[in-house]
Image (cartoon, rainbow, N blue to C red):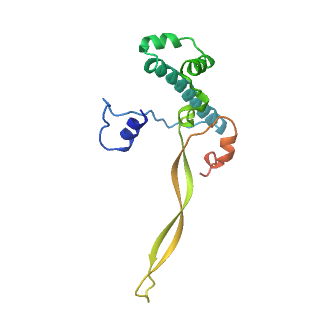
Amino acid sequence: MDRVMSTALCSSEKAIGLKEEPGFDGRVVVYPSNQTLKDYLSWRQADCHINNLYNTVFWALVQQSGLTPLQAQERLQGTLAADKNEILFSEFNINYNNEPLMYRKGTVLIWQKVEEITTKEVKLPAEMEGKKMAVTRTRTVVVPLHCNIIGDAFWKEHPEILDEDS
């Protein structure tokens, strides 16, 4: 699935196997305070975790146990996170806590300043040949992170996200 979605996201052609182009839900919202924004993003990450845990167990039941999607859905109805973790571990030998953070926490995109060093040829007016020099510049780029944003550690590490001037 990861490869199919990467192909769909990164190429100009339609990915093989997809009936439709992938769609994304995007919103622009102004929140009244930084704390409200942090609470909202924390809720979204918790929701990502809940959905991924369900889907991990669901597809293990379908693909490895041979249940139909309806049977897997019925088996999971009313289960809690602890129940799903137990199914994964006892039936499939999967410790959900060892799954990659990308799946458990989702992807957070942040703007981050990075320094780039490039080599440029510089010619002074009186010189025939230029000199190659290393030039450092600072750029702001989008960086994908797979980390926990619930709690204060993430926000202390990236205070620029909530700065008024950024």
- Is the residue 23 above or below the residue 113 in the image? above
Residue 22 lies left or right of residue 52; in this view the side is: left
Name the foreground residue: 45 vs 81.
Answer: 81
Residue shown at the point (61%, 36%) measured from the top left: 37
- Is the residue 115 above or below the residue 32 in the image? below
Query: Residue 95: which quarter of the image?
Result: top right
Query: Residue 150: which quarter of the image?
Result: top right
Residue shown at the point (59%, 36%) measured from the top left: 31
Name the foreground residue: 17 vs 27.
Answer: 17
- Is the residue 117 above or below the residue 152 in the image? below
Name the foreground residue: 44 vs 12.
Answer: 12
Name the foreground residue: 28 vs 24.
Answer: 24
Place of residue 63 in the rendered image (x, y in percent of width and height, measured from the top left):
43, 21
Place of residue 120 in the rendered image (x, y in percent of width and height, measured from the top left):
46, 73
- Is the residue 83 above or below the residue 17 in the image? above
Residue shown at the point (53%, 33%) measured from the top left: 103
Query: Residue 151: which quarter of the image?
Result: top right
Residue 82 lies left or right of residue 144; in this view the side is: right
Place of residue 94 in the rendered image (x, y in percent of width and height, measured from the top left):
56, 26
* Residue extending furthest toward the bottom: 126
Place of residue 58 in the rendered image (x, y in percent of width and height, measured from the top left):
48, 19
Which quarter of the figure is the N terminus placed in? top left
The mark total stands at 0
